[in-house]
């Protein structure tokens, strides 16, 4: 299991230069993931006066996980707008603000609560650009904590990626490290499309050194975490770290897995995924989303449709169990994929 304490992911990072070449930098500053989100948000609010934040306790309280801490004092109460507990109302208000030229960020105190705003997200946010004949753009970011926490109970441990994946007009990304959290936050704010940014409640205290220089990531690109030859492991969010724990065991056993953090949940980066499948010819998907109708099911279908002839074995998929998340800790762990399961699945697939 990923510990709740801070985890240093690495001391070096890659910086894309203006010419597109990659340079390795040793300087930078360490941030926890929630601080990296705040830094990206703050930089964009300083750069663009139309950027604002709407949600419960986002102002002087600083947000439920302190992503907006200290920002109300800096930017004022109108740009950090505290709202009543009424997700459908303030999400609809943010969509209207986006139609009139602002760039609002909606913070859901928990992603499960945004089900109360599903009508606004699906019927308004995702469709108004189309139904208005292109007269309106909806540059809105919807973000907040989700995923299975440490005994937070079923209603606070929702995995809602697949709920929103089927809505036309939305983009979806999931951050997994401080580096990509900041880069994806900045990219999402600058996008003219509505973007849902999924954050995991257990990753907020993850620590990493990130560049001092400004950077913005692409919303539609996967990240090659570890190159390898034997099998492609596709994952995202918290499961990236479970996969990397499993990889240590696999390498000690002589396996050479390739690990890709898909990051973009809609659309999938089929270029990067396809290149990896053509190299390894075996695929394992590891997700925290539900097995029935989850991200893994959609990803498996996309790979089968586009790269079937490249596969030497059936596509493996490890997902959470289709049950409400139990409150009891041991039972909660049983519903989520653990590193030993990943090791076993890779061993079985590599026998083909």
Image (cartoon, grey):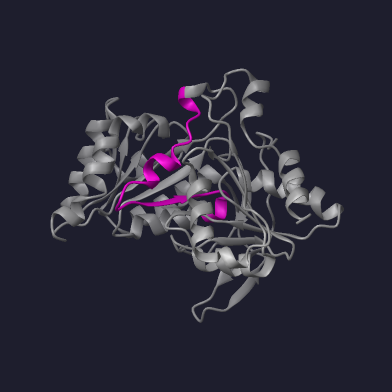
309 up-or-down from 21: above or below = above
Q: Residue furthest right?
A: 253
Report the side of 332 relative to 51 (left or right). Answer: right
260 up-or-down from 294: above or below = below
Most foreground residue, 313 or 117: 313
Report the side of 211 relative to 11 (left or right). Answer: left
The image shows residue 6 at horizontal and vertical percentages of 66, 40
Residue drawn at point x = 67 percent, y = 59 percent: 282
Residue drawn at point x = 36 percent, y = 35 percent: 58
Q: How many marks?
A: 0
The image shows residue 153 at horizontal and vertical percentages of 52, 21
Q: Is residue 25 visible?
A: yes
Residue 122 counted in the magenta span: no
Q: Residue furthest bottom?
A: 19
Most foreground residue, 163 or 32: 163
Residue drawn at point x = 17 percent, y = 51 percent: 99
The image shows residue 177 at horizontal and vertical percentages of 58, 50
User: Quadrant of the image for the N terminus?
Assistant: top right
Report the side of 58 relative to 241 (left or right). Answer: left
Most foreground residue, 310 or 159: 310
Residue 156 counted in the magenta span: yes
Residue 275: quarter of image: bottom right
317 up-or-down from 25: above or below = above
Residue 130: quarter of image: bottom left
11 up-or-down from 91: above or below = below
Residue drawn at point x = 65 percent, y = 37 percent: 337
Q: Which residues are magenta?
A: 155-180
Q: Is residue 78 visible?
A: no
The image shows residue 193 at horizontal and vertical percentages of 30, 57
Q: Residue furthest top?
A: 328
């Amino acid at each position: 299991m990923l510990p709740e304490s801070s985890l240093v992911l690495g001391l070096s990072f890659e910086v894309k230069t203006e010419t597109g070449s990659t340079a390795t930098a040793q300087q930078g500053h360490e941030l926890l993931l929630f601080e990296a989100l705040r830094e990206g948000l703050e930089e964009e609010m300083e750069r663009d006066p139309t950027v604002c934040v709407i949600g419960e306790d986002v102002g002087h309280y600083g947000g439920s996980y302190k992503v907006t801490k200290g920002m109300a004092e800096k930017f004022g109460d109108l740009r950090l707008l505290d709202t009543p507990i009424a997700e459908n109302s303030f999400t609809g208000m943010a969509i209207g603000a986006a139609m009139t030229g602002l760039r609002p960020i909606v913070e859901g105190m928990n992603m499960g609560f945004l089900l109360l705003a599903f009508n606004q997200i699906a019927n308004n946010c995702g469709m108004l650009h189309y139904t208005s004949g292109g007269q309106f753009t909806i540059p809105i970011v919807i973000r907040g904590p989700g995923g299975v926490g440490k005994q937070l109970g079923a209603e606070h441990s929702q995995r809602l990626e697949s709920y929103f994946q089927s809505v036309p007009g939305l983009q979806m990304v999931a951050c997994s490290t401080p580096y990509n959290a900041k880069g994806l936050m900045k990219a999402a704010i600058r996008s003219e499309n509505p973007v849902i940014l999924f954050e995991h409640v257990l990753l907020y205290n993850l620590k990493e050194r990130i560049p001092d220089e400004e950077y913005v990531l692409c919303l539609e690109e996967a990240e090659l975490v570890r190159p390898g030859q034997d099998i492609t492991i596709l994952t995202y969010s918290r499961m990236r770290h479970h996969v990397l724990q499993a990889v240590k065991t696999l390498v000690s056993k002589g396996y050479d897995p390739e690990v890709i953090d898909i990051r973009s949940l809609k659309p999938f980066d089929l270029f990067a995924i396809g290149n990896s499948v053509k190299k390894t010819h075996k695929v394992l998907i590891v997700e925290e989303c539900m097995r029935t109708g989850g991200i893994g099911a959609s990803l498996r279908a996309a790979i089968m449709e586009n790269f079937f002839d490249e596969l030497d074995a059936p596509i493996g998929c490890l997902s959470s169990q289709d049950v409400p998340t139990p409150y009891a800790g041991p039972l909660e762990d049983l519903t989520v994929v653990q590193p030993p399961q990943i090791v076993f699945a890779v061993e079985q697939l590599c026998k083909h």
